Amino acid sequence: MTEVVPQAIRKLSAGKLVIATHNAGKVREIADLLAPYGIETISAAALDLPEPDETGTTFVANAELKALQAADLSGLPALADDSGLCVEALNGDPGVYTANWAETADGTRDWMLAMSKVEQKLVALGPDISRSAHFVSTLALAWPDGHVEWFEGRIEGKLIWPPRGQLGFGYDPVFVPEGETRTFAEMSFAEKQASNHRSRAFAKLVAAVF
């Protein structure tokens, strides 16, 4: 029987890298994490790249879809994040549809609307329902030739109401990470960067490709 040899993870060289998102908060977080590694980042928005329809049913599928499109259109390596809030009592929702819950009729995103939808569903389940939740971040790193590497991070916590804090983005004002009393939106940028789901995924990426 022929032995199957695992393929080595491709390394990333210093140079330009596309951050395949139009979300300014994600761009800032990822650019900050990449800063020590000699990587010059440019966002998909700055390159006027279109946002693909996120048709995948998993975080990995959506992250790969975004990274591959950005790499193909730019001719540069591209890094995409697909992340979401998974609520235990809602069977993992909103999950991969996290951003969809924020969509409005005019095509913009209203994160207070999204947080309210989650809260309404939890309230409907009764006062004793679990408020346990976790954030997942999947990073996909793609090259123009179609090669992809991916890395996942996760952080546990619980949901609170009403929202607290003016920092962060997305569902940060209602998420209290395990071992903390503050929401992500009450933490400084540096504090959140030190321990959130995206930084945990990024630590795996750094260990593998640099």
Image (spheres, rainbow, N blue to C red):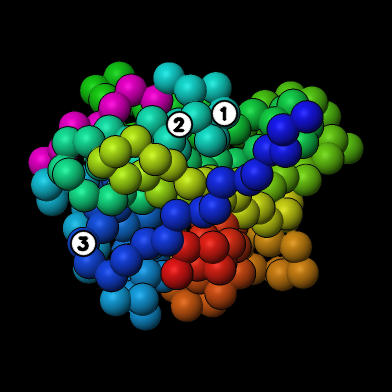
Labels 3 & 2 near each other (Cβ < 8 A): no
Q: Answer with left or right where residue 162 lies relative to residue 107.
A: right
Residue 197 in view in this figure: yes
| Residue topped by disc 2 | 62
- Give, as a three-letter code, the residue at label 3: Lys
The disc label shown at residue 16, or none: 3
The percent position of residue 42, horizontal first and vertical second, equals 20, 58
Mark 3 or mark 2, whichever is nearer to me: 3
Please tell me which of labels 3 and 2 falls first in the chain.
3
Check disc 1 and report its element: helix, strand or loop: loop
Q: Gap between marks 1 and 3, in whole Å?
A: 28 Å
Check disc 3 and report its element: helix, strand or loop: strand
Q: Main secondary structure of the magenta part?
A: loop
Q: Answer with left or right where residue 29 lies relative to residue 17.
A: right
The disc label shown at residue 58, or none: 1
Image: magenta residue range:
48-54
